[in-house]
Image (cartoon, helix red, strand yellow):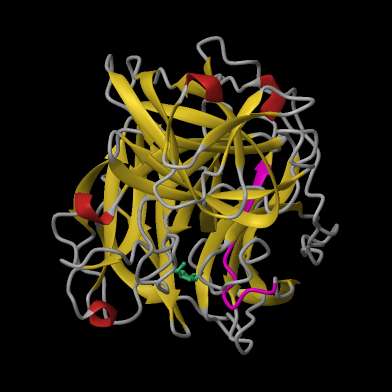
Amino acid sequence: MRNIGMPTDFLKKTSQNPVLTTIFTADPSAHVWEDGRIYIYASHDMDPARGCDLMDRYHVFSSEDMVNWVDEGEILRSDDVSWGRPEGGFMWAPDCAFRNGTYYFYYPHPSGSNWNDTWKMGVATSQHPASGFTDQGYIEGLGGFAMIDPCVLVDDDGRAYMYYGGGSRCAGGELNDDMVSLKGEMRDMEGLEDFHEAAWVFKRNVLYYLTYSDNLDNLNRMRYATSTNPLGPWTYRGIFLEPTGCSTSHGSVAQFQGQWYMFYHNQAISDQGNLRSVCIDQLFFNEDGTIQTVIQTKEGIHPVAPAPGSASNAITYSAENGTLGGNALFVTKERSNSIVSHLQTSGSYCQFDHVDGAEGGRAAIYIRYATTERLSKLHLTVNGDDLYLLNVLSAGSLEDAVGRASITVPLKPRHNNCIRFTAVSGDIYLESITVVPFTD
Ligand code: FUB
């Protein structure tokens, strides 16, 4: 098992939905890899939103207990794609497959400014599940219609199949051993009712399941079909995820530690269809193999394994270690350490100047804060690079810094790094950050 420690006061006992909250994520593709962890490859709704065209910078998340998820950081952005459209963005729903020691990350991206007519299926590879991906170009010979939402199934016999589609048409075909070229032609998947997009194929016992979103007006549901052959024909089975409240629906089904789960997204944090958040709930099968309707919960799920250990290489920087700018000031609260207030006034910030970059080039930052606002935002820069707007959700009172957020960022290895926080909106009190460098 690949162990990734977390600060113990960040550990949760139930996952709660949405489960990924610090940045907006959608279209989760979940996989259990040989290292024993479960991974979510998600697309990333950049904030502030500019519709689906601004989507960029894929992040990967992993867990060993299904409840405590580690953001492993960004793995690919449109700037890394040499053949991609000059304007960037449009990094839509991805998937990942593992074969012969290599991780293959598949993502749809247009090659031209005329995005709707130039979709390609990009592939990036790595020897690691959540870092080190380099782009390998796109799969030749695909095209003709909406080439979005790839899904790749590596079957028990080692053969690999790719599926994709949008705009009422879903295609599937076999990949060669190289995983980046097609063995023969793609063919239309027959037997699906009201297919819209978001194809996902998994296998349970001898049965293949193809799940997808439908065309219900502006509030898609998820349906599924089954087959004893990975490329169909398919037998339509019904709806198993009712609308989530979001205008798109997209998800994956995976088994971990003997339990099946539905990974999907909603817009519960933002109330905006282009700022979505990943959720997880349990999924149950009937004895005949049909899927029960997934019950969408706020509580989420319970752990299926012991919580991660505490990170032995963690370094905590209390707010008092920070340099303040503008109107930011230290205040002493009754039941907590000194914390920084007034971060939201223009030109104000709290900056940590000497964050050790360690060896690996990336580190998880765990942020402790207090706020009573329902949703406010912290603006994060690292070494002067404007990186993210982080969601800061209401937590307790302004007296107790019980709020928690975390993000993984690139750091300069073996250097002092400068991490700066500004509050974009809302009254946020920053207490401390803990930095946990990744070693692999
Ligand atoms: O996230 C962008 C697009 O929205 C996906 O490709 C679709 O499946 C829908 O979720």
Which one is in front, 307 or 403? 403
**Direction from residue 181 to residue 21 in the image, left or right:** right
**Vertical comparison of 168 with 269: above or below:** below
Q: Is residue 254 magenta?
A: yes
Which residue ends up furthest to the bottom in the rendered image?
Answer: 217
Q: Residue at x 82, y 62 (%)?
A: 295
Question: Quick one: quadrant of the N terminus?
Answer: top right
* x, y percent for residue 163: 43, 65
Which one is in front, 172 or 281? 281
The quadrant in which residue 52 appears is bottom left
Q: Residue at x 32, y 81 (%)?
A: 145
The quadrant in which residue 294 appears is bottom right
**Direction from residue 304 to residue 34 in the image, left or right:** left
The quadrant in which residue 420 appears is top left
* x, y percent for residue 140: 19, 63
Q: Is residue 228 magenta?
A: no
* x, y percent for residue 97: 42, 45
* x, y percent for residue 264: 63, 60
Magenta stretch bounds? 245-255
